[in-house]
Image (tube, grey):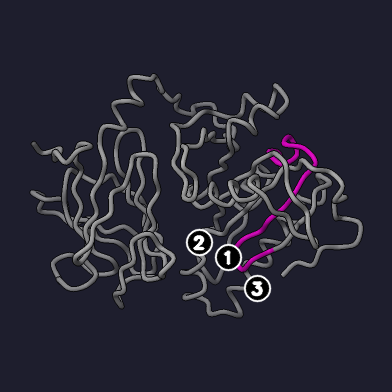
Amino acid sequence: MIAEKKGEKIAESSSRRAILFADVVDSTSIYETLGDTRALAAINRLFAVLAKKVKAAKGSVVKTMGDGMVCQFATADAALRVACEMQEATAAMTSPTLRRELAIKVAFTYGPIVPKGGDVFGDTVNLCARLVGIANPRQVLTTQQTVDALSPGLRKRCRTLPPTKVRGRAAEVAACEVLWRGDADITALNLTKESIAKATQWVLKLSYADGSFTVDPAASVRIGRDKQNEVVVPSQHASRLHARVFGRDGNFVIADQSSNGTFVMVDGSTREIRLRREEALLGERGTIGLGSPTADGGDHLLHYRVQRRGGESSGG
């Protein structure tokens, strides 16, 4: 863990701060691959690099929590710049023992906070934690309210996403993505009111054992063995956090975050897809195997179908 050095802490008298969360992607697999001691050392080496970025921007590391880091800054501008620098620094790092690049996902928000005992609390902090939970690997998310607090030049680095449903909040969140890579050929989002309305006409129904779960197009659902997931699959084939299912531009996507992979068989297809820390669009209906092929049968299988709100299947 990283200890906060004397002089780094922002004065607690201010009521508005930018809060930033940075989470290591696929940490479960890292710990399973390396073991606790080496995995913790690899993550802490990364955190040491990220902490230097925070200090250089006159921010502070509030705390680290296993595979996550919480930081605070005086301004939204500082948080955005550090979020981009964190992604760039992480992309440049490799772990010889993992034989692949480390990756993080980042979110930041700006607003009132409640500082207490060296920690931070309040809705600004809670929303930031929810955003980083639904962010994709190597992505930086924020809110429209935070974008409005940025200087005009930095606002141009943000693009609006479809309204997003986050756990614990009744209303959808106006989410934005920060384009940290600086690519000249970033795809423009075509977000008209008509396209958003069309995308929200469909939901995805996940079924496991005797239960079912409805995935809205703006939601992100976690699947795995851990009881903190929205869909709990207590199978020996499943990882603690095995996969996520979420909506994107009117479609539904499954993202594997497991050790053994996720298998997808679309009804009517003869070819099963195996995902290893990858994403795939889900077809109209099919079967998902956690950690083992769908043909094996057993308690690792989920079934899904895309249907119109109200119950009509997309297949007619």
Q: Which residues are magenta?
A: 64-81
Q: State the residue in front, 256 or 164.
A: 164
**Residue 129 falls left or right of residue 166:** right
Callout 2 crowding tier (Cα within 10 Å): few <14, some 14–19, many ≥20: few
Q: Residue at x 46, y 50 (%)?
A: 167
Which residue is label 3 attached to?
41
Disc number for residue 141: none
Q: Earlier in the sequence, mark 2 or mark 3?
A: 3
Callout 3 crowding tier (Cα within 10 Å): few <14, some 14–19, many ≥20: few
**Residue 179 falls left or right of residue 235:** right
In space, the residues marked 3 and 1 are separated at their CA atoms by 11 Å
Q: State the residue in front, 203 or 2.
A: 203
In space, the residues marked 2 and 3 are separated at their CA atoms by 16 Å
Q: Quadrant of residue 299?
A: bottom left
Residue 290, percent across and down?
A: 28, 66
Please, what is the three-letter code of the amino acid marked with disc 1? Ser
Q: Which dot, 3 or 1, sits closer to the camera?
A: 3
Which residue is label 1 attached to?
95
Disc number for residue 100: 2
- Residue at the extreme right: 7
Q: Which dot, 2 or 3, sits closer to the camera?
A: 3
Q: Residue at x 91, y 56 (%)?
A: 7
Please, what is the three-letter code of the amino acid marked with disc 3? Ala
- Image height of 203 relative to 116, above or below: above
* Label 3 with label 1: CB-CB less than 8 Å: no
Q: Residue at x 59, y 64 (%)?
A: 67
Please, what is the three-letter code of the amino acid marked with disc 2? Arg
Dot 1: element: strand
Q: Earlier in the sequence, mark 3 or mark 1?
A: 3
Residue 175, percent across and down?
A: 52, 35
